[in-house]
Image: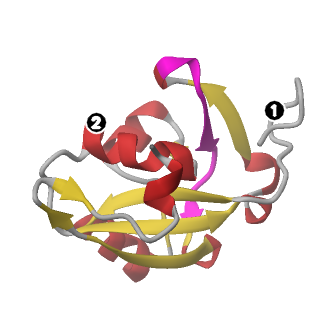
Amino acid sequence: MTAPGVQGITNPMMIYKIFRAGEWAALRDNGQTAGAPIDIADGYVHFSTAAQAAQTAAKHFAGEKDLMLLAVETERLADDLKWEKSRGDQLFPHLYRALQMGDVSWAQPLPLKGGMHQFPAGLEDAST
């Protein structure tokens, strides 16, 4: 979370990025990315916390297959990570530089079953 009143200072935690297959392939191939089209338009890479990831998937990726869930440790992002109000006045992590392949702790498919994305154990529990 954010230190009170200070942008860019975080306690170490994992944050999450959802990419379509082509966006994930571009990151792997190029070693870095400015993100998805919405990230490029907004000027930063959008991330979600564990508690926000399922809602992000439902709102922005409803019914989409072939998604990848990437996990990134906030301490790897240093002062380039800002916590800003967004959906529902919640603070969301936004990365103000290219996402590097070396920033990614792990990535795994985010399968769609019965119209719902299936998050890894522990992540889906945090979102309810």
Q: Position of residue 119 (x, y in %)?
A: 37, 64
Residue closer to the observer: 37 or 54 = 54
Left or right: 125 as drawn, with respect to 60? right
**Is residue 48 in view from this perspective?**
no
- In the depicted structure, whether residue 71 falls above or below residue 61: below
Label 1 residue SS: loop
Q: Within 10 Å of the Cα at label 2, are there few (<14), some (14-19), or many (20+) other Cα atoms?
A: few
Residue depicted at x 61% and y 66%: 72
Residue closer to the observer: 75 or 12 = 12
Which numbered tag is attached to residue 72?
Answer: none
What residue is disc 2 on?
Answer: 59
- In the depicted structure, whether residue 105 falls above or below residue 6: below
Q: CA distance from mark 2 to mark 1?
A: 26 Å
Pair 2/1: label in front: 2
- In the depicted structure, whether residue 55 falls above or below residue 29: above
Q: Position of residue 3 (x, y in %)?
A: 88, 36
Residue depicted at x 42% and y 42%: 39
Q: Find residue 68 and report its image quarter.
A: bottom left
Q: Amino acid at mark 2?
A: Lys
Q: Position of residue 125 (x, y in %)?
A: 48, 55
Residue depicted at x 62% and y 78%: 102
The residue lying furthest to the top in this view is 89
Q: Tell me, yes or no, whether the highlighted magenta stretch contains residue 95.
A: yes
Cβ atoms under marks 2 and 1 closer than 8 Å: no
Point out the tag, 2 or 1, that comes first from the N-terminus.
Answer: 1
Left or right: 4 as drawn, with respect to 108? right
Q: Position of residue 19 (x, y in %)?
A: 34, 60
What residue is disc 1 on?
Answer: 7
Q: Amino acid at mark 1?
A: Gln
**Magenta part of the protein: which range?**
88-99
Left or right: 112 as drawn, with respect to 43? left
Q: How is the image coloured?
A: secondary structure
